[in-house]
Image (cartoon, grey):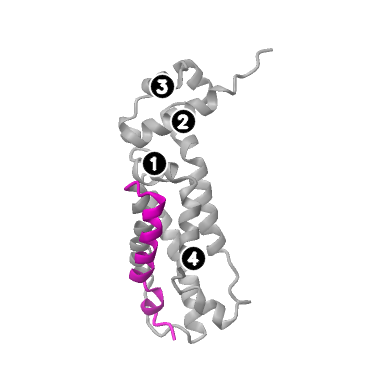
Amino acid sequence: MSVRDTSIDPRLIQSAREEFITNGFLKADLKSICENAGVTTGAVYKRYKGKEELFEAVVKNAFDRMDSFVGLRAGYDLSGLTDEQVRNTWIMNEEQVLEMFRMIWSFREDLVILIDRSAGTKYENYQHDFALRMTEAYMLYYREAKKRGLAKADISKEQMHVLCTSFWSSVYEPFIHKMTWKKIEQYCKVLCRFFNWADAIGLD
């Protein structure tokens, strides 16, 4: 009984990662991926059905991490929070935003591939779909603040979606532009000044 050579997997994924981030999915060449990984195309097809399934394997961790991030926020029970805690969810806390950047930093290349190199795959609308899910989460927090009389401004779901899309594009762009961590730390300060969510919802 033959034993599967698992040593190939990390080389293959890394080679695919480099090819996808350089050329995007549509222009990525499976032959080049195999050559750079030192494996045959046959070895690839024993593991994946084709280029798209290999792409899915590369972005899986980034997708799962972001999915968990939005899932925690969309499914949170706000009823037990104090007014002060609800109010604080709308304050752009530099330390907390930097922590979010730190989380993304650990899988930044895969996230860039997912959001900026995925044309031609089922993920090509990822940015829009993620913004829609975050809009739902933000609306939960907004309605809670509104119900408690903390938010004075009227914001429609459509308006919130545009704001969420703009905000999350601002989160992704430093990674797409390959900012160093030091530059991201500096950028975080600017982002927190620029996006004043408290003013946007008319926080009391």
Q: x, y percentage for residue 102?
A: 48, 54
The residue at the point 40 percent across, 73 percent down is 197
Q: Are marks 4 and 2 in contact (CB under 8 Å)?
A: no
- The amino acid type, in three-letter code, at marker 2 is Gln
**Nearer the camera: disc 3 or disc 4:** 4
| Cα gap from disc 3 to disc 4, whole angstroms | 40 Å
Q: CA distance from mark 2 to mark 1?
A: 12 Å
Q: Residue at x 34, y 53 (%)?
A: 173
**Nearer the observer, 158 or 166:** 166
Say which residue label 3 marks.
36
Q: Are marks 3 and 4 in contact (CB under 8 Å)?
A: no
Specify whether residue 2 is painted magenta: no
Q: Residues within 10 Å of mark 3 (few under 14, many from 20)?
A: some
Main secondary-structure element of the magenta-colored stretch: helix
Label 2 sits on a secondary structure element that is: helix
What residue does disc 1 label? 113
The amino acid beneath tag 4 is Glu
Name the mark on residue 14: 2
Where, quadrant-wise, is the N terminus in this rendering?
top right
Residue depicted at 54% across the width and 58% down the height: 71
Circle 4: is it few (<14), some (14-19), or many (20+) Cα within 10 Å?
A: few
**Which numbered dot is residue 95?**
4
Residue 169 in sight from this viewpoint: yes
